[in-house]
Image (tube, rainbow, N blue to C red):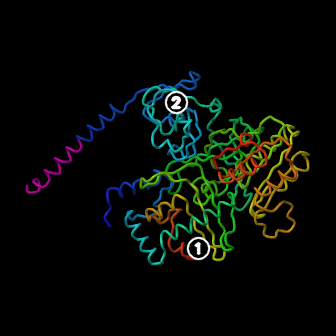
């Protein structure tokens, strides 16, 4: 009976702990039960009834309304912005770094950080109603360079309607040590006329979760979730000369735009396409783009190598792409021609090209890009 | 070494799926304070100074920016690629947000490479945290010594 004496205290503590845990659980269910809440989108255009208490981003996606998000709701990309027109309290410290003063004044919020506890009214771009989630099957994966893969996905009976230049988000499943799903944005390189396929160019980023998955785990025949289309990067319908600049996987939207233009006979405006790579092993699609150049009178393809390794028969330019761009804008395109800039690349590349283009008379508001890198 | 409550909280923030999907600890089962203490010991062993290494890494990061997302040769010995991703990440130690710029340094002759980011550089310089073994952005002292030729 001696042991009962030693067990009494732990048993009592255990019992008290269990009672407290049950009490907290009951209180939590009562206090944190927000019941059904209404989400009014675009002043009555759409109304959703959802269970409250979760972040706005997740509640919207549960109802098949997808806002762009590159981090899957971790609050680290700042992409899932929307305007909240009802009262949801002040901006959180986690939102402030991603918003400028105008956005704060207009009550733009990061939807992943706004917990919906009562009825809420929001405004989102109408185009987002067109965004769908696809269960795609990987039809083909091809190496276009040593670190860029061309991934062709079949979306079966579903169809995707988009304008050339837009992007989708690839939903990377949990793999290896990576917990939870991760979303990353990739411009589509496929043509809008092919409504049953989505093609992407994915460059391996060292340590990158999504690109490592695509390069080392994804196989032909696999299924993968894709959400889209997103983005405002597209050609205008003016007659201004298009000055396009890209490097690496930044080729993707231009492949889509250029072939879409050619296919539709939209070939009356001048298009200059500057594509930069370090060496010839980083270059790709050369033959087909030179072929397009020869068939389309107003299309001018200008590939450039920044550090050529003495490759024999190199038909392009040499030098950093911004230097080549500067020379062409001054000497070949000409200062009097009305121009628009189109860019796809890292924020650093975009900043550098913005500088060269504005110095050569292209107004900043006529330089277009999606700065998602 | 005993873990303070702050370090315990920080180590929780470093797990996969909290701040980043892959986390900061890799396969390392050691406590945060042990990881830091062991790496400080390794830095002394290799005669490496945190501030001087951080300066050198920043030098490569800036040089790499000139490649605009492509590799660029630096000082005829290294191949460097600096790439910026969208957004910021909160420091697991709770001192602010860091941009997501990654930099890969390859020493061409020996074929060794080092990968770091502005974020891992902050953790290295300010907190002497190199990240756990197996983390893709771990700054391994022996690799620093070889790749940077220090």
Q: Is residue A220 above or below residue B115?
A: above
Q: Residues within 10 Å of mark 1 (few under 14, many from 20)?
A: many
Q: Which residues are magenta?
A: A1-18
Horizontal arrangement in the rendering, residue A78 relative to residue A332 (left or right): left
Residue A25 among magenta residues: no
Pick the quarter of the image with the N terminus of chain B: bottom left
The residue wearing badge 1 is: B147
**Residue A240 tag number:** none
Q: Residues within 10 Å of mark 2 (few under 14, many from 20)?
A: many
Residue in the picture at 43% in, 62% down: B127
Dot 2 falls on a residue whose secondary structure is strand
Front-most of residues A79 and A216 = A79
The residue wearing badge 2 is: A84
Horizontal arrangement in the rendering, residue A196 relative to residue A209 (left or right): right
Residue A15 among magenta residues: yes
Residue in the picture at 42% in, 33% down: A53
What is the distance, in whole Å, between disc 2 and disc 1 at their CAs? 50 Å
Residue A17 percent coordinates (x, y): 23, 45
Circles 2, 1 touching at the beta carbon (< 8 Å): no
């Amino acid at each position: 009976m001696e042991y009962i004496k030693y067990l009494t205290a732990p048993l009592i503590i255990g019992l008290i702990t269990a009672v407290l845990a049950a009490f907290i659980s009951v209180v939590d269910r009562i206090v944190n039960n927000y019941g059904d809440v209404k989400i009014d989108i675009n002043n009555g255009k759409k109304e959703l009834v959802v269970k409250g208490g979760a972040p706005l981003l997740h509640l919207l996606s549960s109802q098949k309304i997808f806002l762009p998000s590159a981090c899957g709701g971790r609050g680290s990309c700042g992409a899932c912005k929307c305007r909240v027109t009802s009262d949801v309290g002040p901006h959180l410290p986690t939102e402030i770094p991603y918003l400028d003063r105008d956005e704060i004044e207009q009550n733009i919020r990061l939807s992943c950080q706004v917990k919906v506890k009562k009825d809420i009214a929001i405004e989102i771009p109408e185009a987002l109603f067109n965004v769908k989630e696809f269960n795609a099957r990987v039809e083909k994966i091809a190496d276009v360079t040593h670190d860029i893969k061309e991934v062709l996905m079949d979306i079966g009976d579903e169809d995707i309607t988009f304008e050339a230049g837009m992007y989708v988000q690839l939903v990377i499943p949990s793999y290896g040590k990576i917990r939870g799903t991760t979303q990353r944005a990739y411009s589509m390189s496929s043509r809008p006329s092919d409504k049953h396929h989505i093609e992407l160019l994915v460059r391996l980023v060292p340590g990158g979760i999504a690109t490592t998955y695509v390069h080392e785990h994804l196989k032909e025949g696999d299924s993968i979730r894709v959400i889209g289309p997103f983005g405002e990067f597209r050609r205008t319908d003016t007659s201004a000369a298009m000055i396009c600049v890209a490097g690496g996987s930044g080729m993707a939207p231009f492949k889509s735009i250029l072939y879409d233009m050619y296919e539709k006979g939209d070939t009356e405006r001048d298009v200059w396409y500057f594509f930069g790579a370090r060496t010839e092993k980083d270059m790709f699609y050369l033959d087909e783009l030179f072929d397009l150049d020869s068939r389309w009178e107003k299309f001018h393809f200008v590939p450039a190598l920044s550090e050529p390794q003495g490759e024999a028969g190199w038909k392009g330019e040499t030098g950093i792409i911004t230097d080549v761009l500067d020379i062409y804008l001054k000497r070949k395109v000409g200062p009097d021609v009305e121009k628009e800039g189109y860019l796809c690349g890292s924020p650093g590349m975009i900043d550098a090209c913005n500088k060269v283009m504005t110095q050569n008379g292209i107004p900043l508001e006529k330089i277009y890009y999606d700065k998602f890198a | 070494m005993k873990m303070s409550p702050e370090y315990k909280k920080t180590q929780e923030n470093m797990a996969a799926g909290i701040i980043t999907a892959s986390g900061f600890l890799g396969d390392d089962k050691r406590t945060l304070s042990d990881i830091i203490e062991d790496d400080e010991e390794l830095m002394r062993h290799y005669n490496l100074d945190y501030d001087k290494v951080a300066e050198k890494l920043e030098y490569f990061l800036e040089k790499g920016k000139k490649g605009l997302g492509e590799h660029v040769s630096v000082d005829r010995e290294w191949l460097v690629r600096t790439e910026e991703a969208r957004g910021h990440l909160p420091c697991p130690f709770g001192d602010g947000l860091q941009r997501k710029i990654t930099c890969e340094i390859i020493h061409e002759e020996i074929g060794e490479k080092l990968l770091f980011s502005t974020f891992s550089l902050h953790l290295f310089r300010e907190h002497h945290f190199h990240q756990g073994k197996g983390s893709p952005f771990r700054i391994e002292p022996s690799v620093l010594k070889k790749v940077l030729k220090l």
